[in-house]
Image (tube, rainbow, N blue to C red):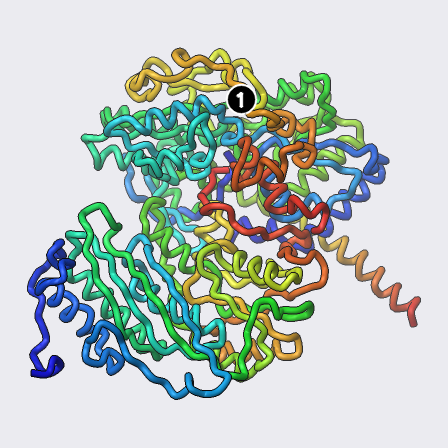
Amino acid sequence: MKYVDEFRDPVAARGVLAAIARTVDAIGAIKEKPIHIMEICGGHTHAIFRYGLDKLTPPGLEFIHGPGCPVCVLPMPRVDEAVEIAERNGVIFTTFGDAMRVPGTKKSLLQAKADGADIRMVYSPLDALDLARRNPNRDIVFFGLGFETTTPSTALSIQQAAVEGLSNFSVFCNHITVPPPIKALLDDPFMILDGFVGPGHVSMVIGTHPYDFIARDYGKPIVVAGFEPLDLLQSVLMVLTQISEGRAEVENQYARIVPEHGNPISIAACNDVYEPRDSFEWRGLGEIDKSGLKIREKYAAFDAERKFNIGYAIASRALAEPDGCRCGDVMTGRIKPRACPKFGRDCTPEAPLGTLMVSSEGACAAYYQYGGAQLGDVA
Amino acid sequence: MNAHLRPPRRLSATHVTLAHGGGGKAMRDLVEDVFVAAFANPGMGEMEDQARLTNAALTVPGARLAFTTDAFVVDPIEFPGGDIGKIAVCGTVNDLVVGGAAPLWLSAAFIIEEGVDVALLRRIAASMRAAADEAGVAIVTGDTKVVGRGSADKIFIATSGIGVIAPDRDLRASAVRPGDVAIVNGPLGDHGAAIMIARGDMNLSTKIVSDCRPLGALMEATLAAAPGLRAARDATRGGVASALNEIAAASGVGIEIHEAVLPLRAEARGVCEILGLDPLYLANEGTLVAFVPECEAAAAVAAMRATDAGRSAVAIGKAVVAHPGVVVMNTMLGGRRIVDMLVGDQLPRIC
Amino acid sequence: MCLGIPGRIVAIADETRKLALIEISGVTREVNVACVAPQDEPLAKLVGSWALIHVGFAMSLIDEEEAAKTLALLIELGEAQAEIEAMRASAGEVVAS
């Protein structure tokens, strides 16, 4: 596969790994006092474990798994609202696959489907639009989920629905943005972070300048990274090189796909369709200002919250996490999954307590699945 | 008048109704014209309530009867490379042959939803006959029920299968020991990918077809070349990963496999990359994992490659002393990670 | 937010709705190309280009030059390391013999 296989080459990997080891040495980092690099994006967490990169990099380098998993940070009340909409008469509720397993306070979408709600998995909001065209007597609702990578596709779909007058199509908007939680993490006095591996696909939409504040105001390096293992490794090397040279800059490892100023058409569509919510709840992180998006008045007809009279303005928030759940601490990198007392015992992929175990990008699920829960460091 | 001398019943209805499950003339017509006509074989005998069968191999001292049962509910009913009938026959046969049995007879019970197209039933029956012929088995007895609309997803098939295991054979997962080599007979995940495409939800197009096929000839050829073969497992639901985990659990060995050598068709790979699926967990319907002693591995692979079902056979790893019960994969990058059992279904990701 | 895969644009399906057919390892799908559509030029110009595909949308055209540059750096690191390992291996042989 072009543009994929080349970036998985094992010979090149050995080269980058050797360079990483040399640089970690030069910095003087060791297992007891490692360099902390946060990979923000759930897709990067997944790639690290899928390829076993955490075992290939030296002990003086520690990955801190960040909150960039939109499924993981979905608060339970929002899942409840999704289920409520899905269970309304005449609704076809469409969603990405991985969102179906997230537990609400009563049930997940998968369970609601088993109970009879018409919930369908789609690969793209375009498929939801198509369902709306073919089922004029049904209400098609699309579960809009994801960071800036995915916000344009939902926005463009809403614009298309408006052009066609598809009044039976609406979006339950749970889109969130990356810079606010990063700022929240950097402002947290307990966080020890030396650098960031930045979200490559978010950046292909927003460009690299939204991260300037990280280098400028907090003095931390950030390298925007692609998702193949060589991309990740090269980005780690670039962060380490900055640290060893005493620099703090925004660098772009994923230049083949990420333009410096992002994608103007995507950005324009998003500005046309969305406006920021004053605050939005992130599971495990609490309320973060200006981190969520809602659909503008202009497109009110396509806003499922208005259509079904549900959601942020109406429901009461502040739901406590299940007893003992430490998703928030894991998500902000304070503790590793294994340090959570529930990990592998009361919280397993079969019976997850928190979302980090439900979603395949969640750090806990990745640790459990790829790292082996009960076995310590067998691999 | 002898039953087998009267003219066979013809079914004129185009769609199945509840009457066709009622035990009366309508059902008799359906059974005879659709199923009996397609499956016709001496084992059916005079159409008593039971098939009466003999086979010399069963009477050999030390021979064992192999007996398996299965149910099939695949959606969609028809897909590139097969249909529910073909899977029913191949799946049952494969459950027998991976234990070293010579498969002999199958039963097939059909639960049919009211309103199903009779032409669909005929296609499924024909498909089952073709698969049975290829596998060298006969469908000798069956049952038919019709349920109301909505009570079944078009058609469910439940089967059982009987085979005979020769006295000198004793394949068992618990016999796998460190050093044994793991071999698969073909590319992984074709069936799972084909089904996902055929369901249509993802709106993807590709040429991939299910690998659904009987593996009796492959097993016999492999056992002839590698009589020390310890165990084989059909890698159906849960894919090769599940089969490997089952063997590791049963035998207490650890298993190591190598990502770089796993056979995968380009299209199956494409589906997995687009949807974020792991091919190790995709279902197969004509792919098995076999463990053979190291000294017989080359001969086993060669024997498989000489058969239709094993052209891409390859050794993918081996049983080891380390990490008992756990399956570990050496990634193409030189890293290592665990290959655990699946929890629920694999769901496509956006991340 | 991350699962994207490079795909080749092989045909234009609908000029008005900005839909094109892409191909990834023998799998094809209709995707929306609004984000990568050339300004003031027909969509057909896209045929043959590679783009990053995410949830049915072509989000960014792949810059072949940048890809080559990134790859060249990686290959260089890989070759340098391979040389080092080869030297070590042969040094080991010398010592052993």
Residue A50 or A27: which is nearer the viewer? A50
Q: Residue at x 23, y 34 (%)?
A: A133
Q: Residues within 10 Å of mark 1 (few under 14, many from 20)?
A: many
Locate residue C28, reporting x and y percent.
37, 50
Relative horizontal placement of residue A63, taking residue B197 as reference (left or right): right
Q: Residue at x 79, y 34 (%)?
A: A34
Locate residue B177, reporting x and y percent.
66, 69
Q: Residue at x 21, y 37 (%)?
A: A134
**Res B327 quadrant in image:** bottom right
In the rendered image, the vertical position of residue A106 relative to residue B16, given as above or below: above
Amino acid type of the residue tagged 1 in the rendering: Trp
Q: Which residue is mark 1?
A: A282
Can residue A255 be seen here? The reply is no
Locate residue B56, reporting x and y percent.
39, 88
Check the picture and name the quadrant holding the N terminus of chain B: bottom left
**Res B41 quadrant in image:** bottom left
Residue A319 or B158: which is nearer the viewer? B158
Locate residue A138, reporting x and y percent.
22, 30
In the rendered image, the vertical position of residue B336 relative to residue C20, given as above or below: below
In the rendered image, the vertical position of residue A340 relative to residue C53, given as above or below: above
Residue A60 or B214: which is nearer the viewer? B214
In the rendered image, the vertical position of residue B42 relative to residue B260, given as above or below: below
Q: Residue at x 51, y 46 (%)?
A: B343
Residue A27 or B11: which is nearer the viewer? B11
Chain for numbered disc 1 = A
User: What kind of element bears circle 1?
Assistant: strand
Count of numbered circles in the view: 1
